Amino acid sequence: MCNENLIQMPEIRVVLVEPFYEINIGYTARVMKNFDVNKLFIVNPRIEIGEIARRFAMKGVDVLEKARIVKSLTDAISSVDLVIGTTGKVSNKILLRQALTAREFAEKISNVKGKIAILFGREPSGLTNEELMLCDYIVTIPANPEYPILNLSHAVSIILYEIFLTTRRYSNKPITVSRRYANLVLDYVSKICDTIGLDSAKTSKILMAIKRIIYKANPTEKELRTLLLFMRKIYVLLQPADSDTLSPYF
């Protein structure tokens, strides 16, 4: 049955950050094949990827063979529209935002048009706080609080399953946030904080709070552009009178 409101699978990029074990890389390729996701990026793997990974990839070996090995996380998330971090333990004190469950996340991106990178951390320790700070959303999988950490490939399979399931349903609530304009707004907020003399710790908290507000509000591109112009005007007005900064009146 065709319907223009039927959800289309967004373009998902699975990113494994410094994986330690071939078996998990192979299993990840396998579950990606299960759920029709074929873009795998591997950041600075801690082992050689060889026959063991191929064996456990099974019919997902084509996903494994096409995987891109990159040296840095920056390389892995370049050109995407949303960056999603995964974690087994959530510290709101550090992240300054509420983590979504895998199901909530799948619903939230149900009509995203663009590229989404989902980051999965190292088997022993996960993603660092600095890596999580690069993410637009944080996703967690609810589990036994006494032992909430899942195997890497199991976590990949649960999150991809929820996305796959959601694409088989209907929705009228797409995410419309333009990452480009959201980042430009945050750039001006950072400049304003610097201009008024805030230290880096306070600036980081303000940036994360505003980032959380933006993505929670889900503004249109037009609304973000309006906010960007407003932030730019504030920044310009804060400059010394003899500054060469552009006029705030535009």
Image (cartoon, helix red, strand yellow):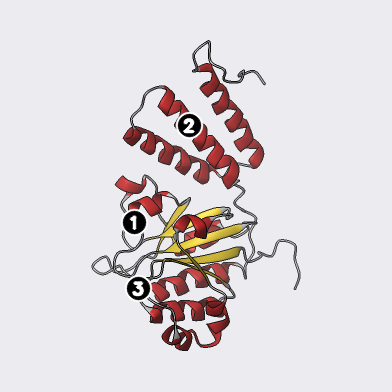
Q: Which residue is mark 2?
A: 189
Left or right: residue 107 compared with residue 124:
right
Q: Earlier in the sequence, mark 1 or mark 2?
A: 1
Task: Give the image location of residue 83, x and y in percent.
Answer: 50, 55
Q: Secondary structure at mark 1?
A: loop
Q: Does residue 234 lie above or below 208 as drawn?
A: above
Q: Which residue is mark 1?
A: 128
Q: Of the residues shown, which amino acid type is indicated by label 2?
A: Val
Q: Of the residues shown, which amino acid type is indicated by label 3?
A: Phe
Callout 2 environment at 10 Å: few (<14), some (14 to 19), or many (20+)? many
Q: Earlier in the sequence, mark 3 or mark 1?
A: 3
Q: CA distance from mark 1 to mark 2?
A: 24 Å
Task: Give the image location of residue 134, x and y in percent.
Answer: 44, 50
Callout 1 environment at 10 Å: few (<14), some (14 to 19), or many (20+)? few
What residue is rendered at 56% in x and 76% in y? 35
Q: CA distance from mark 2 to mark 3?
A: 38 Å
Left or right: residue 219 compared with residue 142:
right
Q: Quadrant of the N terminus?
A: bottom right
Q: CA distance from mark 3 to mark 1?
A: 15 Å
Q: Quadrant of the C terminus?
A: top right
Q: Secondary structure at mark 2?
A: helix
Q: Earlier in the sequence, mark 2 or mark 3?
A: 3
Which numbered tag is attached to residue 230? none
User: For residue 51, which quarter of the picture?
Assistant: bottom left
Q: How many marks?
A: 3
Q: Which residue is mark 3?
A: 20
What residue is rendered at 57% in x and 22% in y? 233
